[in-house]
Image (tube, rainbow, N blue to C red):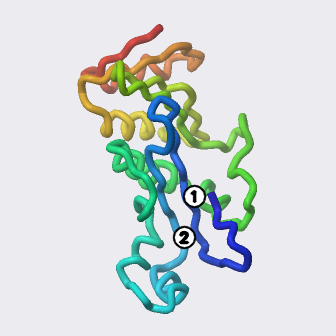
């Protein structure tokens, strides 16, 4: 989400992560791409700590956050924002979606989380750069309790998920 306030030039974006099973947002992550001094000046120097949070990436203050929020912040910082092309598309000033569905440059992961049955389904994962899909899987696994099950309903990957199972053998994999 970009700021839609008329005349605002805050140069930041909010990633709102929603879970159907959770009934709404599980994290709202702020990322500003300018230097911290830009945000301090933009806020007229009122709060240096807040300027640091506005630079981010950080969990957005005042937004609902779940227990998954820290892992989602880690995924954002260490996978999504490591992709220079992705960062540049965000910074480009367009308020259109970062990438169209099925765009070959899209990077992201769609998860279905079931808190009652304690499983996560990797619904969709896309990475234009070699190794980024594995980093997304690692970030998801890092944020999940060990007893949760990982479900792969349909595997069209040509071996990716089998490779992930071999790379992360202690995870509870379930291929349906």
Residue at (47, 86) in percent of width and height: 40
Q: Is residue 16 above or below residue 31?
A: above
Looking at the picture, tell me which residue is in the foreground, 24 or 152: 24
Q: Is residue 142 left or right of residue 85?
A: left
**Disc 1 versus disc 2: nearer the observer:** 2
For label 2, the residue is 33
Q: Secondary structure at mark 1?
A: helix
* First reached walking from the N terminus: tag 1 or tag 2: 2
Labelled pair 1, 2 in contact (Cβ < 8 Å): no
Residue at (61, 73) in percent of width and height: 11
The quarter of the image holding the N terminus is: bottom right
Q: Is residue 136 left or right of residue 117?
A: right
Residue at (56, 17) in percent of width and height: 158
Provide residue 105's location: percent of width, then percent of height.
67, 44
Q: Is residue 54 above or below residue 28?
A: below
What is the crowding at mark 1: few (fewer than 14 residues within 10 Å), some, or many (at least 20)? Answer: few
Q: Is residue 48 above or below residue 153?
A: below
Q: CA distance from mark 1 to mark 2?
A: 12 Å
Residue 12 bears which disc, if any?
A: none
Provide residue 141's location: percent of width, then percent of height.
34, 33
The image quadrant that residue 47 belongs to is bottom left
Looking at the picture, tell me which residue is in the foreground, 145 or 126: 145
For label 1, the residue is 84
The image quadrant that residue 156 belongs to is top right
Residue at (59, 59) in percent of width and height: 87
Provide residue 17's location: percent of width, then percent of height.
51, 45
What is the crowding at mark 2: few (fewer than 14 residues within 10 Å), some, or many (at least 20)? Answer: some
């Amino acid at each position: 989400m970009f700021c839609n306030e008329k005349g605002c030039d805050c140069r930041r974006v909010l990633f709102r992560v929603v879970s159907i099973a959770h009934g709404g947002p599980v994290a709202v992550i702020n990322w500003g791409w300018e230097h911290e001094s830009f945000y301090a000046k933009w806020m007229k120097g009122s709060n240096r700590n807040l300027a640091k949070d506005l630079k981010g990436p950080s969990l957005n203050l005042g937004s609902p956050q779940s227990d998954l929020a820290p892992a989602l912040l880690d995924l954002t910082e260490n996978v999504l924002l490591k992709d220079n092309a992705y960062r540049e598309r965000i910074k480009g000033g367009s308020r259109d979606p970062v990438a169209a569905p099925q765009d070959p440059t899209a990077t992201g992961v769609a998860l279905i989380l079931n808190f009652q049955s304690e499983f996560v389904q990797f619904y969709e994962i896309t990475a234009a750069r070699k190794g980024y899909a594995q980093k997304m899987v690692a970030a998801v696994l890092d944020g999940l309790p060990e007893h949760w099950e990982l479900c792969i309903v349909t595997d069209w990957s040509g071996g990716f998920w089998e490779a992930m199972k071999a790379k992360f053998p202690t995870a509870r994999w379930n291929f349906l």
